Amino acid sequence: MIRVLLADDQALVRGALASMLRLESDLEVVAEVGSGTEVLDAARRTAPDIALLDVQMPGRDGLSVAAELRRALPDCRVIICTTFSRPGYLSRAMSAGAAGYVVKDSPPEQLVNAIRRVHAGLRFVDPALAAESLATGASPLTDREADVLRAAADGGTVADIARTVGLTEGTVRNHLSSAIGKTQARTRAEAARLAETQGWL
Amino acid sequence: MIRVLLADDQALVRGALASMLRLESDLEVVAEVGSGTEVLDAARRTAPDIALLDVQMPGRDGLSVAAELRRALPDCRVIICTTFSRPGYLSRAMSAGAAGYVVKDSPPEQLVNAIRRVHAGLRFVDPALAAESLATGASPLTDREADVLRAAADGGTVADIARTVGLTEGTVRNHLSSAIGKTQARTRAEAARLAETQGWL
DNA sequence: GGAGACCCGTGCCATTTGTCATGGCCGATC
DNA sequence: GATCGGCCATGACAAATGGCACGGGTCTCC
């Protein structure tokens, strides 16, 4: 039996996934949690073989949880399962030690397939996303540029951004200008949107 | 037996929901589709009692599908099931003739509960969302303002917006200015974000 | 026949924004 | 030690933006 831990913030989806996985005779859902902070505790209690983590969860990011989970329970392998097919997420997931990456668009069998393969010691990455990831490459943004762009994402003024990041307005404008150039955008809003969809933030 | 049609663009979630609903002895999933355009055909073929529609789907909006479905098959009742708890979506869903509104955050039993209640001729709306909807009220934006804001959402310049909407730059600026005032924002990006989260777009 | 809403356009002005040049301060690399 | 890249800051300038006033057009409702 493959012991599975399920982490997703949407209770309905989480429950539905659990129902589906339970139909497989070789799978056993041993824990269901709805936030990133609960994952480690639950994993220590139930010692799952596979942890299925969503990226965006309240409390803690699924990617950062993956890294810590890997250190705390080396025998537990991680599969990231998320709505977003963003190249940046994939690369961050892999460098966080994840063994699998499944997009919620893919057919149900693919998730089960991924679980079995990962449990067998292999890796599994959504094929389409893998190709796209190779095409777009890594983030061209520096850390600060990403910070500033993140702060700019909700549409505030330069003064707002400067306050939240703790910089001068002029510096913020420089970082923004640089980010706009690198993302080939013409507005910081556009730059933020592009960087977001690439998973660079 | 309650016959259910399932429409959600994410195949994994759709399949999982189907698995879950099939566990209930009085429910029968008679159709699964992944886009708004397929809903009507599938409904005509399978004559479901309940159509469970996601809001955002490729092809056609779940809300507009709901309205047409209601006209084409008056006996089929519609439940909107979506990730987003946005007041505007709820009011639009209700005016489109939906009988239920369930958020994907809610526990699995709530969906089953909603299906049974709606099938019994009652209505079901997520309680938290219903309260929030009453609090925020209807959209203050005019049609054109909403159009312009929608076009502004991806961060283009005023010239871009004017081109996509087919207006003069000056007019676009006026609509934007008005929308900014109504949403109490200080940037059109902020206004677009606010309107978006309220479900006004 | 108004009154009032929304729509579209023009024009003007203060502010904000994007861009560029310049300089100092690190830490890494050669 | 020199060089390079990232980071922070300043200053200056053209363009874009937001705010506002104005006029004309179409509707609906009273």
Image (cartoon, coloured by chain):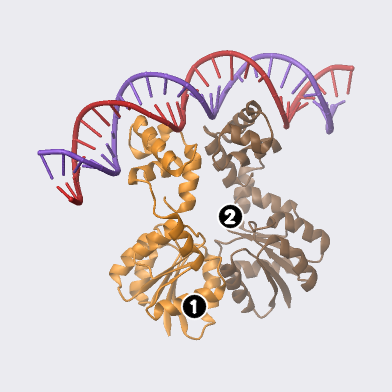
Chain colours: A brown, B orange, C purple, D red
- Nearer to the camera, B162 or A165: A165
Q: In the rendered image, which quarter is residue A21 located in?
A: bottom right
Label 1 chain ID: B
Q: Residue at x 64, y 33 (%)?
A: A162
Residue C10 vs residue B161: left or right? left
Is there any visible trace of residue B138 in the rendered image?
yes
User: Of D8 and A86, which appears nearest the observer?
Assistant: D8
Q: Secondary structure at mark 2?
A: loop
Q: Amino acid at mark 1?
A: Asn
Question: In the figure, is residue B52 to the left or right of A89?
Answer: left
Up-down: is C9 above or below A191? above
Label 2 Cα neighbours within 10 Å, binned few <14 / some 14-19 / many ≥20? some
Q: Residue at x 40, y 79 (%)?
A: B119
What label sits on residue A149 in the rendered view? Answer: none
Does label 1 lie on the same chain as label 2?
no
Q: Nearer the viewer, residue A156 or B165?
A: A156
Where's residue B14, x and y in %?
Answer: 51, 68
Q: CA distance from mark 2 to mark 1?
A: 30 Å
Q: Residue at x 77, y 56 (%)?
A: A67
Chain for numbered disc 2: A
Secondary structure, mark 1, is helix
Look at mark 1 in the image and give the residue it sits on.
B113
The circle on residue A84 is 2
Q: Quadrant of the N terminus of chain A?
A: bottom right
Q: Vertically, is B198 above or below A77?
A: above
Q: Work out whether B25 lies above or below A72.
A: below
Q: Of the residues shown, which amino acid type is indicated by label 2?
A: Phe
Q: Is residue A123 visible in this depiction of the protein?
A: no
Q: Could you tell me which quadrant the C terminus of chain A lies in?
A: top right
